[in-house]
Structure formats: C-alpha cells, structure tokens
Image (cartoon, rainbow, N blue to C red):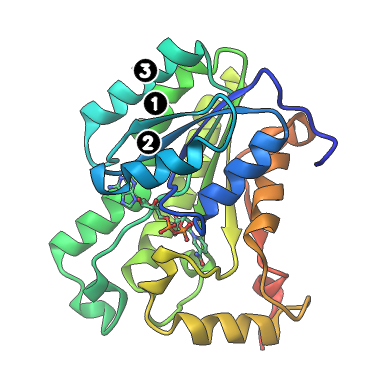
Amino acid sequence: MYPIDLSGKNGVILGVANDRSIAWAIAQVLAQAGARLAFTYQNDRLKDRVERLADTLDGSISLPCDASDDQQIIDLFQRIGDSFGDLSFLVHSIAFANREDLAGRFSDTGRDGFRLALEISAFSLIPLVKHAGPLMANGGSVIAMTFQASQKVYPGYNVMGTAKAALEHEVRQLAAEWGPDNVRVNAISAGPLDTLAARGIHGFLDMKRIHAEKAPLQRNITADEVARTALYLCSDLSSGVTGSVIPVDAGYHIMAV
Ligand code: NAD
C-alpha cells in the first residue's frame, strides 16, 4: 500500500490478457490505491480470463474493445460514461504485430503487416483519447506503454519499433492538444518483461539477459515497478508532467556499451 489515494477516481485499463500482463500489474496497484476500474477484453476468447481477474477487484467492470473497431471504441466510452459518470485515467497497454514481422529482415515487412502493427499499437491511442477526453472533465491522465526500440535498433523488434516511435510522437501531440483541458498524456518505456506479447519477439530472452548485464542497476525490472510509475502518473504527484516518455528500465537506456 502506497500513500496515494485514488478513491473516488475511475480509470479504464486496456491490455489485460492474463495475470502476467503489464496492464494487470498496473490495475492491481491502482485498485490498491482505491481507484475503480473498467477493464477491456480484446475478444470473446479473452473475455472469461479478463472477467475472472477483474472480479477480484472491488467495483470493477469488464467491457469488450477491439482497438481495430471504431464502433467498439465509441461503445466503450458510452458504457463507461453510463457506469462511472467520469474518468480520471486511461491506460493504453496494447500492441500487436504479425509474428513474421517480428523476425527476419525489416526490409521484408509487408504493407498489410505494417498497417496492422501501426494501427493496433500506435493509431489506437488517437481514437481512445478522443473519446475518453470528454469524460475527463476534471482533468485526467493517459498512459501508453512503449519500448526503447522506438529510438534504437533492436534486431527482432522490427516493425514494432516503428510503431513505438509513432506512439511516442502521438503522446507528445496529444499532450499538447489536451493540455488546456488538464488531460496529461505520458508514456512509460519499460525494460523487457516476460509477457505473452514479449514471447512473440525473436531473441527476447537474450535481450532480457543483456539488459540485466548492462543496466546500471544490474538487473531486470519488475512489472510492479512499471505499475508504481503508472500510479505516480495517475496521481497528483505528477500534476506537472505531460508529454514525457519515462524509462523504467533499470537505467539501461543511458548505457552505450
Ligand atoms: P500482453 O500480451 O499481456 O498485452 C498485450 C495486450 O494487447 C493484450 O491484452 C492483447 O489483448 C492486447 N491487444 C492486442 N491486439 C489488440 C486489439 N486489436 N484490440 C485490443 N487489444 C489488443 O503483453 P504486455 O507485455 O503486457 O504488453 C503491454 C504493452 O506493453 C504493449 O504496448 C507492449 O508493447 C508494451 N511493452 C512491453 C514490454 C515487455 O517486455 N513485455 C516492454 C515495453 C513495452
């Protein structure tokens, strides 16, 4: 339990697939601080699992949202408005690319694979903020999840690095646009964590090992460390912070060799 009180605040968390998801770690910490949460599930295959997890947190609800479907995004915020009245934060913790685009030569990335990766992993933040923003009448905090492959070449990350670069730019663009409404938009750039999505990255285990060897803190991070940074970003402690990408990577990003 941390000395941050989010009671009376409502949030929506996109990206829980299972109990290893970064979104789930964030949800648990926000719920401990007293927030009421709406979870989304991508499809019927994930519905039961997300509902089972959501049911462990008092007052939470689960709603469908495939980020590739505009109508589902509109319906999501309609239903959140009906259930909660307002929103204080949104956590965008979703990404997708075809497996074949996360290995091999970047030059072989096809038009459809590029479009899909960018649409789900980057574009989706735009309509989500567009429809969440009006529910954040008392100000709000939006958090997106990114990775250092937006800035540097990680073999295997391929088109997802391009998507993360786009996502980080959107964070700045949206932060500038929504700042006058006191809606803050930031990203957390997490070090490697063993999740379903990470398993799709070619060479992920080597990446994790190298991070632990080279990072100033000489270890990998935990999902809970990401979650506590999300708690800071959702609270008034970060009231002056927007448009930022905050690395939670044991310091790996500062190292050259
Ligand atoms: P995860 O597999 O648990 O979560 C990915 C989520 O994306 C899943 O819940 C999935 O349902 C959702 N998703 C995919 N396509 C979707 C769609 N069309 N509509 C709605 N949701 C969709 O993996 P994770 O590692 O927790 O990933 C969460 C975020 O963190 C991603 O943006 C990822 O790139 C980022 N990230 C992960 C790491 C890592 O090492 N795991 C590091 C840095 C950033």
Closer to viewer: mark 2 or mark 3? 3
Q: Which of the two discs, 2 and 3, labels the residue nearer the N terminus?
A: 3
Residue 164 versus residue 59 in the image, above or below:
below
Residue under label 1, please give it: 130
Q: Which of the two discs, 3 and 1, labels the residue nearer the N terminus?
A: 3
Question: In the rendering, at what x and y percent does residue 1 appear?
Answer: 80, 41
Contact between marks 2 and 1 (CB within 8 A): the answer is yes
Q: How crowded is mark 3: few (under 14 residues within 10 Å), some or many (20 or more)?
A: few
Question: In the rendering, at what x and y percent does residue 241 appear?
Answer: 70, 38
Amino acid at circle 2:
Ile
Question: In the rendering, at what x and y percent does residue 247 appear?
Answer: 65, 60
- Give whichever of 143, 44 is nearer the camera: 44
Closer to viewer: mark 3 or mark 1? 3
Amino acid at circle 3:
Arg
What is the number of the mark on residue 126? 2
Residue 58 versus residue 196 in the image, above or below:
above
Residue 142 versus residue 148 in the image, above or below:
above
Give SS at disc 2: helix
Give SS at disc 1: helix
What is the number of the mark on residue 113? none
Q: Which residue is drawn at 71% across and 22% down?
A: 7
- Give whichever of 103, 51 is nearer the camera: 51
Give SS at disc 3: helix
Q: Which quadrant does ligand 1 occupy? A: bottom left
Q: Dividing the image into 4 quarters, which one contains the C terminus?
A: bottom right
Q: How crowded is mark 1: few (under 14 residues within 10 Å), some or many (20 or more)?
A: some
